Image (tube, helix red, strand yellow):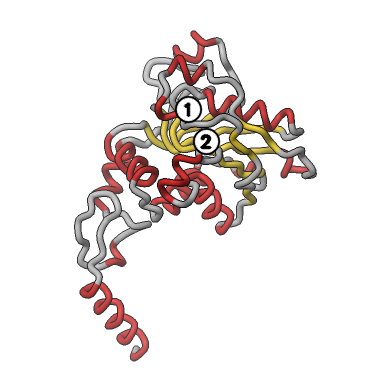
Amino acid sequence: MCRQNTSFGIHRFLDILFPPRCILCRNIVADSRKLRHGLCDSCLEELALQRIGGNSCISCGQRLVSESGTCVLCRKNDYIGIPAKAVFSYRGAARFLIRRYKFNGIRTAAEFFSICIAELIPDNMKNYLIVPLPSGKGSRRRNGWGHMETVAAFMAKNGFTSAPGLLKRIRKGEQKGLSREERQSSGQLFSCRPCRKKGNLQRVIIIDDVRTTGASLRSAEAALRIAGYTPALQIVIAID
């Protein structure tokens, strides 16, 4: 009991000295133990509203309302690749948190995103290789670290096998400044080291932050196949 009281006292002292804040709304929370992955209950409820659950497009992960199988856009583009999933729709609190993570360097959000992605991985794929799309040079200069590589690192701490440096960007610049048409016609974006893995580590789950046209994911999939890997699933934090 004495140890518990001492621990509680130190905890309360630190909370008074450094008031804990939610990484999304930035509101002070009286007790840091009420934050889950740096997020307050109110923000977690807001994020839950943007979760994509139930019926979704098997090709891009977009939420489906009156359709089934694939969405109109995927049918129009006549592209059915490997299965794809998305955690959130890219709007509201989800959009704000992703942007804070990518552009304001709120690195704490990486753990939350890693858990969200892990929840979408089927049990029979949990020993597949996790491959994040590498950040561009602009993003690395801005934050000093790669945002999806950091998410993959948290997944590795929780028992997954990840390969943060497997893909390399061969095209300069970031996708965020391009139009939909420019993204689709941007050509091959990545190179990949030859596969020397055996068994399930040849099978790959590609992860990324936001899917807009899917051009980056398709380019990554192509590079992995050329290198001898077998892409099995794509998972993004959000789909626009």
The residue most toward the top is 76
Q: Is residue 36 left or right of residue 237?
A: left
Element at label 2: strand
In the rendered structure, the answer to whether residue 153 lies left or right of residue 43 reads right
Image coords of residue 129 (percent x, y): 66, 44
Which mark, residue 61?
A: 1
Compared to residue 37, the image places residue 92 above or below, namely: above
Q: CA distance from mark 1 to mark 2?
A: 8 Å
Classify mark 1: helix, strand or loop. loop
Quarter of the image that includes the C terminus: top left
Q: Which mark is residue 157?
A: none
Residue type, mark 1 in image: Gly
Image x and y of residue 58, in percent: 53, 24
Q: Residue at x 37, y 50 (%)?
A: 105
Q: Are marks 1 and 2 in contact (CB under 8 Å)?
A: yes
76 and 56: which one is in front?
76
Q: Amino acid at mark 2?
A: Ile
Q: Which residue is mark 2?
A: 235
Quadrant (top left, top right, bottom left, bottom right) of the N terminus: bottom left
Q: Position of residue 217 (x, y in %)?
A: 55, 29
Question: Image height check: is 177 above or below 51?
Answer: above
Residue 20 placement, left or right of 76:
left
For the residue pair 174 and 158, the one nearer the viewer reads as 174
Q: Residues within 10 Å of mark 1 (few under 14, many from 20)?
A: many
Along the viewing direction, whichever of 67 and 136 lies nearer the viewer: 136
Q: Taking 55 as reference, is 158 above or below it? A: below
Label located before the other in sequence (1 or 2): 1
Q: Quadrant of residue 220?
A: top right
Find residue 160 and report its horizontal and vertical position in percent. Answer: 61, 52
> Callout 2 environment at 10 Å: few (<14), some (14 to 19), or many (20+)?
many
**Residue at the spot x=61%, y=44% of the render?**
130
Residue visible at 40% across and 27% down? 177
